Each structure stands twice: as structure tokens, then as C-alpha cells.
Image (cartoon, coloured by chain):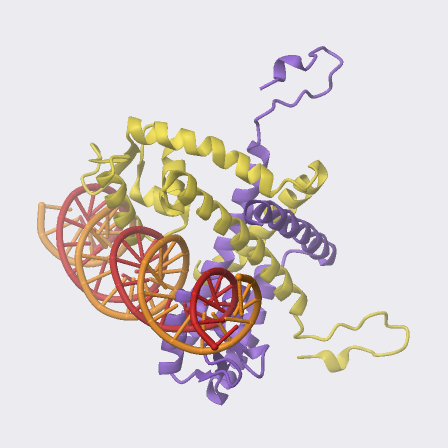
Chain colours: A yellow, B purple, C orange, D red
Amino acid sequence: MDDQAIPLDAETKAVEKPEDHREELRLWLRLLTCSTLIEGEVRRRLRERFDVTLPRFDLMAQLDKAPEGMSLSDLSKRMMVSNGNLTGLVDRLVASGHVARTVSPTDRRAMVISLTEAGRAEFRTMAGEHEHWIADLFGDLNTKDRSDLMRLLAKTKLSARRAIMGDEK
Amino acid sequence: MDDQAIPLDAETKAVEKPEDHREELRLWLRLLTCSTLIEGEVRRRLRERFDVTLPRFDLMAQLDKAPEGMSLSDLSKRMMVSNGNLTGLVDRLVASGHVARTVSPTDRRAMVISLTEAGRAEFRTMAGEHEHWIADLFGDLNTKDRSDLMRLLAKTKLSARRAIMGDEK
DNA sequence: TAAAATTATTTTAAGCTTAAAATAAATTAA
DNA sequence: TTAATTTATTTTAAGCTTAAAATAATTTTA
């Protein structure tokens, strides 16, 4: 710590105390609150309206974007959850007839997970309502708010990735 | 759907299709990505560095702000998790000597949960490092970015609360 | 090619999380 | 004051989640 080297005088507008990161902490807690609040409400509505859990919905949302299906690893990366987690989740979605599991024709280790027709139909119905819920939850933000927030979150995402990468790569 | 009633002509700058809320959806997914990314990293570091889970840390963080302790209900509201969840979490923290559970002197139904001295000392150590991690994760945002983001998230929080309240109150 | 390393997935053990039902104490209303 | 309601917490059952170890197939390297 070399804060003794910083000249302190009446002209210095705001000498920041080193080691004080309460502002960033509040920012993080607020971000987490928003995300928890919205996620909880979406979870509640999915259960109430369609008797489906959020993880099931999220998995189907990924598969809906990949008509040919996806490997477990790809799903794991995109959803940012562990592989082991997906194994169980896919088990249950197979049991309920929403998704299919087939062995990859080119790699015998890999499983290809895809939506069944029934699963796709059910997902599309849910996704339609889901989109309205999100629009409502963000409804008090105007166009500029949304684009500003989008940009700042993009910057946050890059910043976090940079900080995370530093550790392990 | 009354979109047939909207006059369409070359002068109309941007006739928004009703029912299209893909922008809000993208905003929500980006918010969720940021939160998941940061939360995952904090979870990983807490485990690696202190062998503690994030829920345990969060609970201790709440108690650290309440020197006299808090009831389970208050904890539940602040942490936005279910009561049943807290029962088990507190069980484990009592078992490890980090928190104490006493019956409220004024209400025999209520439990007062508080940090033990050991729990408080351990939390303070962890919190010190934790604050640096957060500062690092948000490190690429400048002062204006942070205050803009703070303001927009405050607006988002209010918007979500308004949307959630409408359902049940 | 055989050995070593990597990649894909599953299994395991422990803990987290929720919703819903149950229990118990306090408050309100008749 | 008794009965009804509300509030605080726990229990239960099911599912979610992770980290770490295990298994198995592919790719790389010597």
C-alpha cells in the first residue's frame, strides 16, 4: 500500500481511501436482487401456469434454438450448470416425454439431446406467455433505459469474464 | 389483436409489431448471465479459499449487519429464500459453531439467530477478501458506468416489484 | 501403434431449494 | 373468553445443484 505517497491537501477533491469497495459491493447486491426477484417470479408463474420448473423450461429453451439437438457439454456450457446436473434433468425430461436422448452417430461418448414434437409444442406455448411476463417485469423501463442497461450489462459481462479468466487461464 | 387498425405507410418511422418483446427477453437473459457468472465465481472462490458455501456466507452477511440477531422470518425476507430453506441452513451453521439459535424472550414462536464470536470473526475475514473479488469482477466499469448501472438497476427493481405486486396484492 | 492425455458423460455424496402441509404460539374478533 | 385467524417455524417430499471421482471413448504424442 503506497497511500502515504499521495499528497493530501485542501485542493484534493476526493482522495479515495484505498481498500474501500463498498460501492461495487452495493452494485453487486443490487444486480443480484434484480435477478433473484425476477427469477423467483418467473419460477412461480411457470409452476402456477404450466406446472413446470424453471430448469426444465431453460433446458427446453436451449433445445428450441437447436433444431438438430445439442450435446450435454454444449448444454452445460450454455446453461452454465454442471454436467452432472444435466444428467438428472435430462432423465426427468425424457421420462416426461419432452426430450429425446440419442447417441451421437460420430462420437460414441456423446449424447445428442433434442426436443420431441410434444416437447417443442409445449415449450412454444409456454415461451409465448413467458415473453409477456418479462416485458411486464421490465415494463417501467423506457427504450433508452433498456439500451443503456443492455450496454452496461455487456460491459459487466466482459469485465467479469476478464476477472474470471485471469485465475485459470 | 387489433394491429389491423394501425395505419401503415412509408412515413411511419417504426411501426412496432405488437407482441414482440424479444428486446426485453435479451435484456433479461443478459442480466441473468451477469448474475450467474459472478455468483458462480464467488461461490468457487469461497469454497476454494475458505471451504464455505455461498448460502452460508450470505446468511452470515445478514447477521453481521444485525448485532442483536434476527428472526428467521426477517432472514427469510432479506435473503429472499423460503423459511424451510433457512431451517436447514441454520441447523448446519449451529452445528459448525458459527451461529446461535435462541428463543425470543417476547415471542415463544420466534427464534433469534445471531453470529457467535467465532462466526463473526470468520465472517469478517472472508468479507474482506470477498469485497476485493467483487471490485475485481466489476473492475472494468468506470465511476460513471457504475452509477448509471446502479440507477438503472434501481429502476428495474421497482419495475419488477410493481409487476409482482399486481398479482398478489 | 501403444501410452498418455483429453473429452463426454455418469455416478456419488452432500448440501441447497422450493412448495405444501403440519405444528404451535400469538393476535383478533365475536 | 372462546373461537377464528394470523404469524413463525419446522417438516416433508421432490427436485435442483455442485464438486469430485469414476467410466468410457476419442485424440494426441512418443
Q: Is residue B2 visible?
A: yes
Q: Nearer the viewer, residue A152 or B54?
A: B54
Q: Is residue B53 visible?
A: no
In the orientation shown, which residue stands out farthest toward the top? B9
Question: Which x, y percent locates residue A18?
Answer: 69, 75
In the orientation shown, which residue stands out farthest toward the right? A11
Q: Residue A124, located in which quarter of the rendered image?
A: top left
Residue at 62% across, 43% down: A150
Question: Which x, y percent locates residue B133?
Answer: 55, 67
Residue at 28% across, 30% down: A116
Residue at 47% across, 88% down: B118
Residue B21 drawn above or below residue B109: above
Q: Quadrant of the C terminus of chain A?
A: bottom left
Q: Is residue B156 left or right of residue A104?
A: right
Residue B115 drawn above or below residue A161: below
Question: Which x, y percent locates residue B20?
Answer: 57, 27
Q: Nearer the viewer, residue C7 or B24?
A: B24
